[in-house]
Image (cartoon, rainbow, N blue to C red):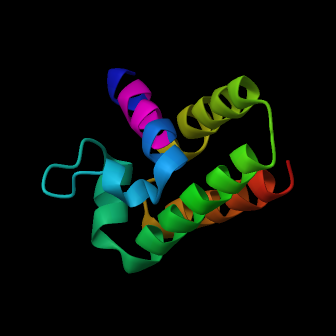
Amino acid sequence: MKNIRLFVALFLLFGLGGPLLAAINCSNPNSNVERLICTSSRASVAHEQLAFSYNLAMRRGVDIKMLQESQIDWYENVLSVCNDVNCVVQAMDERSYELENY
């Protein structure tokens, strides 16, 4: 749970200023999801797109607290259960679409 909260906090912090990829330390990934992102170009691209979509949602004036809470919920209940690259990419693509339509 601590790793999830840390990842989400970093996601929100780095998601505000640029690509989320900077928030993951690929020399020492903290979770299976981070390892999958670090070892797959498809997952890395999906990760960057997700950060971009998150930034766009913020710029459109979406309620920040609601956005953060929904992102934490999504991470804990969807992304963190992924065990392969296809799952990670699909989850991030779907979340990007959701964020673009907030």
Count of numbered tags: 0
The answer to whether 62 is drawn above or below residue 94 in the figure is above
| Residue 98 shown in magenta | no
Q: Depth check: 30 or 18 in front?
A: 18
Q: Is residue 9 magenta?
A: yes
**Main secondary structure of the magenta stretch:** helix
**Whole-percent x and y of residue 81?**
50, 43
Q: Nearer the viewer, residue 52 or 73?
A: 52
20 with respect to 70 (left or right): left
Q: What's the residue at 22%, 49% (across, down)?
A: 29
Q: Which residues are magenta?
A: 5-11
Residue at horizontal 36 percent and vertical 29 percent from the top: 6
Residue at position x 60%, y 43% in the image? 78
The picture places residue 67, in percent across and down from the top left corner, at 71, 34
Query: Which residue appears at 64% of the width and 38% of the height?
Result: 74
Quarter where residue 9 is shown:
top left
Front position in the image: 52 or 70: 52
In this picture, residue 36 sits left or right of residue 30: right
Query: Given the current orientation, which residue lies at the most extreme left position?
Result: 27
Q: Is residue 14 above or below residue 46?
A: above
Q: In which quadrant of the rendered view does residue 69 lie?
A: top right
Find residue 28 and report its horizontal and vertical position in percent. 14, 49
Q: Position of residue 15 (x, y in %)?
A: 51, 48
Q: Residue furthest bottom?
A: 41
